[in-house]
């Protein structure tokens, strides 16, 4: 790793989107094969070493939402857990709408009731910090047809915003033109809408329209793949950017246009040669959020510290109930 220990602990990050329920972390399973025992806490410890003080576990089904809430609540009660603040989301991902609301034995209203219960419980305990992941995704219509996605995004949006929980939205927007934007415009005003369009890889024009609605733009490795992506990132206002890894996905690869801006590297081993305490090749981790910040800093021609500090403050501003970092994480 190229960064010094001093730099590792002087920067602060919030990873607003981490898929830490993935079985590669929880069970050490890769493509159906068991490679190792869970190294979840070690993943969190590496995150702390790189300045990650807050992590948001993203959920995309009812089951995942329940698991995320239970994990965060258990973590909060764990005396020997790494001193990092965990929160989670509750909602149904667009590609899971068919599976959750149409194909399930329970009717859609019952699923909504259970999701609402998790939102209300998690808001009271401080464990749930956002509604989502939900939105639209037309790249993967084989999993959930367009009409089903639209119907149940609208129904989730209307019902959950109507609860008055004051939670931000964690939004998915993939190859849908302005459909997501127009749904949001129809249902709310700038004063009442808070949230982030995560893993953004669309046009500057669309990003600005989301920003005009009061939303932030979430960036990860999948937002930094092409020269066109970088041109958008260069023009995005820094005070509207949030950082995420979307791990274990969206690692910044050597083929990505922004890769040459990376200053911090991580030694990794293949999952077949796993060693406890070592990172795994092909499995992105929250500690790698520093690389996202480095690419953004390089593209914008700004100091890394300025980008990290601004994005951290943006996250604190959005996630109002999620702002107390454990002292050990920032010393």
Image (tube, helix red, strand yellow):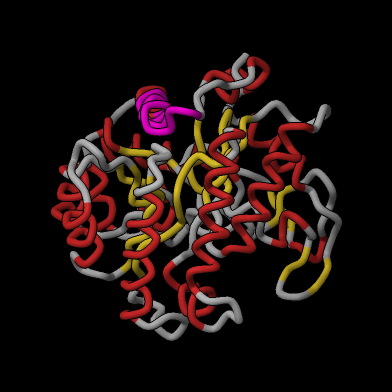
The image shows residue 316, relative to residue 217, as above or below, that is above
Name the foreground residue: 183 vs 140: 183
Left or right, 257 with respect to 19, comes to left
Left or right, 276 with respect to 324, comes to right
Q: Main secondary structure of the magenta part?
A: helix
Image x and y of residue 196, in percent: 35, 46
Kindly tell me whether residue 205 is visible in this rendering.
yes
Q: Could you tell me which residue is drawn at 38 percent across and 56 percent down? A: 159
Q: Quadrant of residue 2?
A: top right
Q: Could you tell me which residue is drawn at 17 percent across and 52 percent down? A: 204
Kindly tell me whether residue 288 is visible in this rendering.
no
Name the foreground residue: 176 vs 229: 176
| Magenta run includes residue 309 | yes
Left or right, 270 with respect to 56, comes to right
Q: Which residues are magenta?
A: 308-321
Image x and y of residue 57, in percent: 58, 47
The image shows residue 98, relative to residue 64, as above or below, that is below
Q: Could you tell me which residue is drawn at 53 percent across and 47 percent down? A: 119
Image x and y of residue 62, in percent: 58, 63
| Magenta run includes residue 291 | no
How many dots with numbers? 0
Q: Could you tell me which residue is drawn at 55 percent across and 21 percent down? A: 324
* Quadrant into which the C terminus falls: top right
* Quadrant into which the N terminus falls: top right
Image x and y of residue 42, in percent: 76, 40
């Amino acid at each position: 790793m190229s960064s010094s220990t001093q730099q590792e602990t002087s920067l602060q990050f919030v990873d607003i989107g981490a898929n830490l329920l993935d079985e590669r972390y929880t069970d050490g399973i890769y493509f159906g094969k068991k490679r190792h025992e869970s190294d979840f806490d070690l993943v969190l410890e590496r995150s702390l070493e790189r300045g990650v003080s807050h992590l948001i576990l993203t959920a995309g089904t009812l089951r995942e939402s329940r698991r995320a809430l239970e994990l965060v609540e258990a973590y909060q009660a764990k005396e020997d857990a790494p001193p990092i603040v965990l929160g989670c989301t509750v909602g149904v991902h667009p590609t899971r709408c068919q599976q959750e609301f149409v194909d399930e034995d329970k009717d859609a209203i019952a699923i909504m009731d259970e999701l609402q219960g998790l939102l209300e419980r998690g808001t009271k305990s401080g464990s749930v910090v956002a509604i989502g992941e939900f939105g639209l995704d037309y790249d993967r219509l084989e999993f959930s047809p367009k009409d089903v996605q639209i119907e149940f995004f609208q129904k989730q949006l209307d019902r959950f915003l109507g609860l008055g929980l004051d939670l931000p939205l964690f939004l998915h927007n993939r190859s849908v033109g302005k459909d997501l934007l127009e749904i949001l415009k129809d249902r709310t005003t700038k004063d009442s809408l808070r949230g982030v369009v995560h893993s953004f890889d669309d046009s500057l024009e669309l990003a600005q329209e989301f920003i005009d609605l009061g939303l932030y733009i979430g960036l990860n490795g999948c937002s930094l793949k092409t020269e066109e992506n970088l041109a958008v990132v260069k023009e995005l206002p820094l005070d509207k950017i949030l950082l995420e890894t979307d791990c274990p996905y969206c690692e910044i690869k050597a083929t990505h246009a922004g890769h040459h801006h990376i200053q911090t590297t991580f030694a990794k081993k293949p999952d077949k040669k796993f060693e406890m305490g070592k990172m795994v090749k092909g499995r992105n981790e929250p500690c790698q959020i520093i690389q996202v910040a480095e690419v953004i800093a390089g593209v914008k021609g700004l100091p890394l510290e300025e980008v990290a500090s601004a994005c951290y403050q943006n996250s604190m501003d959005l996630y109002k109930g999620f702002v107390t970092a454990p002292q050990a994480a920032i010393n």
